[in-house]
């Protein structure tokens, strides 16, 4: 006997023994062939739960104590960064802004920046909503992702070659927050306050 878990065109088959898993794989091959479909060979394999497996952005594995854990897989933060890069295109010919132009009041008049903030917030809400239940070990990774996004956004405002302390001094976090730019840490803190029991390993 084995169980089948599917989302869209991704699925996992859970079996009790190696023999059952091999039989399930054989049946899947037959069914897909009959339907004229091909499976992704790089993702098709038989693994033991102790070794873990990836599914839909998470990694599942069993610890030495016998507990099954669900964590964010390593590629998911990398994909977050890539999505942020796509949402924060920088212009090579952009002229650096001076300090007088970097006030919240003046930056709000920049339609491109306001539109970008809206797109970034939409993406961050969705990304956090998907992964929020497994960020139980701490917020270090979330802070790192927030820092990456702020660096990208500062470059959009100050110019491609404006880096280092000058950029952070000209565009501190205290300036970015009034513009409406959300943070993952802020979203997660609000979630944990609303759901106290969610800060547990799962």
Image: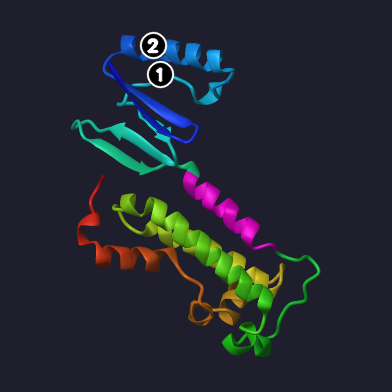
Q: Quadrant of residue 115?
A: bottom right
| Residue at x 52%, y 52% (from the top left corner) | 80
Q: Is 19 placed above or below 192 here?
A: above
Q: Is residue 40 left or right of residue 111?
A: left
Quadrant of the drawing holding the N terminus: top left
Disc 2 + disc 1, Cβ < 8 Å? yes
Quarter of the figure with residue 24 = top left
Q: Position of residue 62 (x, y in %)?
A: 27, 31
Quarter of the figure with the C terminus:
top left
Query: What are the residue bounds of the magenta stretch?
Result: 76-89
Question: x, y percentage for residue 69?
Answer: 28, 38
Query: Is residue 80 on the magenta stretch?
Result: yes
Q: Position of residue 182 (x, y in %)?
A: 47, 70
Residue indicated by mark 1: 46
- Earlier in the chain: of badge 2 and badge 1, it is 2
**Apparent side of residue 93 relative to residue 39 in the rendered image (left or right):** right
Neighbor class of circle 2 (other Cα within 10 Å; few <14, some 14-19, many 20+) is some
Res 17 → quadrant: top left
């Amino acid at each position: 006997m084995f169980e089948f878990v599917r989302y869209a065109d991704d699925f996992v088959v859970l079996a009790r023994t190696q023999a059952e898993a091999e039989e399930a794989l054989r049946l899947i091959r037959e069914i897909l062939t009959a339907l004229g479909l091909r499976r992704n060979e790089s993702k098709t394999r038989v693994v033991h739960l102790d070794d873990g497996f990836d599914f839909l952005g998470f990694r599942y594995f069993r610890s030495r104590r016998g507990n099954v854990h669900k964590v964010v897989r390593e590629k998911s933060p990398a994909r977050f960064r890539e999505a942020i890069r796509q949402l924060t295109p920088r212009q090579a010919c952009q002229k650096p802004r001076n300090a007088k132009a970097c006030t919240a009041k003046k930056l709000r008049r920049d339609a491109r920046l306001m539109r970008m903030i809206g797109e970034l917030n939409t993406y961050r809400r969705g990304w956090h909503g998907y992964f929020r239940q497994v960020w139980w070990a701490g917020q270090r990774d979330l802070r790192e992702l927030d820092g990456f996004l702020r660096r990208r956004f500062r470059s959009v405002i100050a110019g491609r070659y404006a880096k280092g302390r000058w950029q952070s001094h000209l565009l501190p976090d205290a300036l970015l927050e009034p513009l409406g730019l959300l943070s993952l840490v802020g979203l997660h803190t609000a979630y944990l306050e609303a759901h106290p029991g969610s800060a547990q390993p799962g």
